[in-house]
Image (cartoon, rainbow, N blue to C red):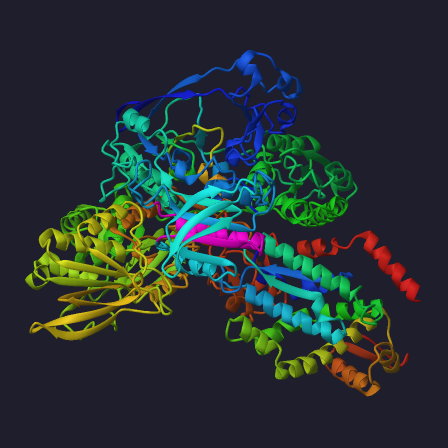
Amino acid sequence: MCSGRVDLEFMLRAFSKGQDGVFIGACKLDECNYVTHGNYDALANTYLTKKILAHIGLNPERLRINFMTGADGNLLAEYTDDFTKEIKKLGPLGRSEGLDVNKVKFKLEAARKLVPYMRLLERQRLRVPVKSKEAYAQFFESKEINTLFDEIFSEKLAISQIILLLGEKPLSTSDISEILNLNPSEVSRHMKSSSRQGLVKYDETQKCYALA
Amino acid sequence: MGNDILPKEIIQQFSDSPVSINMGDKNFGDVMVVGGGVSGIQASLDLATAGFKVYLVEKGPSIGGHMAQLDKTFPTNDCSM
Amino acid sequence: MEGKKGDFNVSLKTKPRYIIEDKCTGCTTCVQYCPVHYPDPFNQDISDNKAVHVYFSQAIPLVAYIDDSCLRLKDKKCDICSGVCKTGAIDFRQTTKKTDINVGAIILSSGITPFDPSAKEEYGYKTMQNVVTSMDYERLLSSTGPFEGEVLRTIDKKHPKKIAWIQCVGSRRVTEGDNSYCSGVCCTYTQKQVILTKHHYEDVQCTIFHNDIRSFGKDFERYFQRAEQLPGVEFIRSYASIEKEIPETRNVIVRYATADDGVKREEFDMVVLSIGLNPPAAYKEISEKFGIELNSHGFSKSDSSNPIKTNRPGIFVSGAFLGPTDVPESVFTASGASAQTGELLDYRRDKLAKERVYPIERDVSAEEPKIGVFVCHCGANISSVVNVPSTVDYARTLPNVVYATEQIFSCATNSAREITDLAIEKGFNRVVIAACSPRTLEPLFRDTLREAGLNQYYLDMANIREHCSWVHAKQKDEATQKAHDIVRMSVARAGELEPLLEFDLPVNKAALVVGGGIGGMTCALSIAKQGHEVHLVEKAKDLGGMARRLHTTLEKLDVQTYLDELIHKVYQNPLIHISHEATIKEVSGYLGNFTTTIETEGRIKTIKHGVSVLAIGAEEYKPSEYLYGESDKVFTHLELGEEIARGNKAIINAESLVMIQCVGCRNEDRNYCSRVCCGHAVKNALKLKEKNPDMRIYIIFRDMRTYGFREDAYREASEKGVQFIRYTPEDKPLVEKAKEGGKDVIRVIVPDLILGQRLELTADVLSLAAAVIPSTSTNEIASHFKVTLSPDEFFKEAHVKLKPVEFATDGVFLCGTAHYPKHIPETINQAYGAAGRVLTLLSKDTVVASGSVARVNDYDCVACGACISACTYDAIEFRDTPKGKKAFVNPILCKGDGLCNTKCPTNAIMLKHFTNAALLKQIDAAVTSKDILEQMDAVLEEA
């Protein structure tokens, strides 16, 4: 198993279970012992997850990737110490960011449901052509990518959250907009597109939406 | 790091190779390897894997030779154990 | 020892251990109670051990032995160890045991003895406390060393702040008691020690007194630069001597001289003597007993056309007994000796060796997970920090755990047996070993599970050593808590493990060798002599490669005669099929079953083979500097050698000849040393001096890198009047055309570093040490065989030290200068080495493929191709199925990296053994119930 096997889902799952920080140790970039250089995939997944964290309102520094060789035990210790300090400084997940822990977990869970979609997105829009640390940083930190990501992701996250909510019980548009703190017109737009896609249906008698 | 005596690959092969270390009841073998340092171990493993019965003879109480005493190896600083 | 090849009788004496090996568990209780303290030879006598002890903590076999300092052995006084040993392993009645063994061949791998500087007073070793050898220093650096990895002065346990290394101790000196040759490893091991020292202690001043820096090995040049560029590290090119010890501080005064400041004296807290390598201590005895000849230095006397063989047929030599060598050479000469033994004894292969038979695997797939947990003390490595009994108790409370216990060393033979027995007795079907990193011992424990009739993939290792006890030595309670967490996570994963099949792949018993130079031909011949078909593919019209242009070597090999004989043997061998003027068009398949398409002499040919050897050689750099190509008086060393062999009068009768070293390498474009050029320069100089003793010869060099026995030739050249002038890359020699006394000459202007002036040399001939550069076809061949290149664009071996002739790609091997520049005898050794490794595969009918590979669930696969583009091994392809086009994984090509798994939008492809189910369970288990309670409390508080 390569560090490239570290899935978006693994990272999000750990946070949604309440971990305050997640650390990924990978082989040194450009020093792959095979021909895969899968640590670049780990790096890309880390960038993506950081964006998701930021989107939810969590400090992206809660996720870290460091690169080292099998002989760098002392580096691992150093990085881990440093990261532990950082996480202690940041404090408990969500609360330190002034967020409701349960809401954070709910959002993370909704984000986790989006992993298959994120994989498609990564393949189509977020793949970096050049394998270098600088190229990855430049790409993932660029304005265009941030805007693109925010647009697409906020849309998808909203729908994912709505679906999760409706999984518990049927709700009206205003209920949803209140729980999720979203603009009612935005919610109704999502509801329309979701019912078109056959994800949800409108129950005329109860005047609310339910899962299709 | 580095507290595992032999190069990992070597242990791995050791565990499932028909190498008789030093002693054995049946005293017929194909090859005798004199010296249980990294070279003697490698020769024994290759021969055993290639279908020969090997007697590995070491004068000290353990195999590993001088390499086992080294902290790390150049130029990668990999563990020598 | 007596007899002849195929039938040697050896009589062995085994010294008594006074320990019954089968009974000893390596628990070291006896060591605790033994009253005798005795300097520990493994730790270079720096720290003490006991009369009864285990040689070192990972010794094999991991059992104690009793040495001569034992009171009981001396005068029958003490019997404490027998009393405390719970297994009754102590046995003082043991005597020297004699065993007679009959073998067909013998390999002498007697290694080296580190040079002992105490023999010479001037080194101050043993008389001054803070003068240590590099071997002592290795132990000081080691975490298993006398001070657990802390570099301390033995006398006052203080950290040295200023450390000096003195190079070439015992080497490159013709004085009595020293060795005239260069040991070849000291420059680079010193750089390693400096790098590690600076890593441990940033503030330490490191000073290295050296002669030439001999970074002639692969990646050594970069390594040297790395050491040199560290802050607080100074390399001083000067002879240095130890003057005295300061009585109050026990610091050591080192005397040295520099060109700028003249003689200087400097005080150091510690001085490390970079000692060289001597032949094995018992070399005379070895030579007499085995009837083999030695060279004047006490190493095996080698025939440079095949250094591994000895004068006595059936007896071979490997490793440093061939001459001072580094680990990779020790490894590939071992494989080479194995190949040559195979040539000799091919007729008796598989007659005596027995395959292991395992019990039939129990089908437990219908059972609930029942997990057995074994928590290892690792001697005291784990248990001195982590509370092992508490971890065992905790493990018992975990879901699915039916049994848990502790073991002193889970990896010991008796512990493995305990696991096997208990698995059967308690009926558990999954095993968690809480011990060390799976990197080393997972194969061993998998084997243990097989012995217990369980599928070997029902194992998970919880790493409570590297990830816990070693890094949290000072926080015992927290470390114990963490060990609990790690075990809990491991148990969670273990419950989700599935049995996997490893299957046998048939091996096509033919080999493909690419490249018909010395390396390729030697390798092909050795494989063929062991009964396998070999397809030898050469791009040129004729066999021979670069060696066609070489005529002599420093070892006085007549290269052309040797080459002709070799080519003859290759043509004569009925199992070798040669393709000339061949280019590789396509390679497909994998270990055991490759198909290669080549174009040879205009025809297309398809070759099926089980393994591939890449021996494509290297090329000579065509200089663009120093008037090369602009004057007919300028040659490369290779051309010069050819001209000398041809008897070119203009060269042999020249009055003056200048050589410039390091042309086209050791620079920004090629940051490596071409290794062979210093030897070539000396060889050509000696040859010219032999033909024309009056010729003035100047060798302008940066560092003379005549490592090993080549040092003797360097000295000889110097004695014969060849002048060596050093230059630096910042101030290169200037070369211009000139006229002198009416004839055309080359004028070479070079700074004299010692006198600080400029020297003007007039040369009739200028010869350039042109770099050895990778073959132009390297990239193409690499992409065909899916192998990787090093930063310098030579082939990259799987592991620098331990796998020097194989690629990370299974079934593909390498040898010769395609790996890195090397001399002919080195190429020959490496070629035999590759043949030895090839035979470990070809001698078998099948190879085993891992069970941890990706698998596609057809039902979920949407044929989007994301997995296919993620796979660098081309292991996934679309196949038509009744359900339509679906991705299919070739389990033989799959390396189990799992990249496809993270790319699949429908989770249809999954890496076995590292499934989402198992890993998510493990991630979930990272959260403790305590964590959850705390979180709930916090939420309540807020509310």
- In the displayed structure, would residue C727 be above or below residue B45? below
Comparing A84 with C719, the one in front is C719
In front of the other: C523 or A194: C523
Q: Magenta stretch: residue C193 in it?
A: yes
> Based on the displayed image, in which of its 4 quarters is residue C776 positioned?
bottom left
Residue C712 vertical placement versus C753 (above, below):
above
Q: Is residue C51 left or right of residue C784?
A: right
Is A60 placed above or below B37 here?
below
Q: Answer with left or right where residue A13 lies relative to residue C11.
A: right
Farthest residue to the bottom: give it.
A185
**Residue C885 locus on image (x, y percent):** 53, 68
Residue stretch in magenta: C183-211
- State whether residue C928 appears in this view: yes
Q: Position of residue C19 (x, y in %)?
A: 55, 21
Is residue C924 found left or right of C619 in the rendered image?
A: right
- Nearest the camera: C591 or C130? C130
Residue C482 at what x, y percent from top left?
A: 73, 48
Residue C708 as seen in the image, left or right of residue A202? left
Q: x, y percentage for residue C467? A: 65, 49
Q: Nearer the viewer, residue B67 or C227?
A: C227
Residue C859 visible from this viewpoint? no
Whether residue C359 appears in magenta in the rendering, the answer is no
Q: Residue at x 25, y 46 (%)?
A: C712
Rendered image quadrant of residue A164: bottom right
**What residue lies at 59% left-to-right and 20% top-to-bottom?**
C89
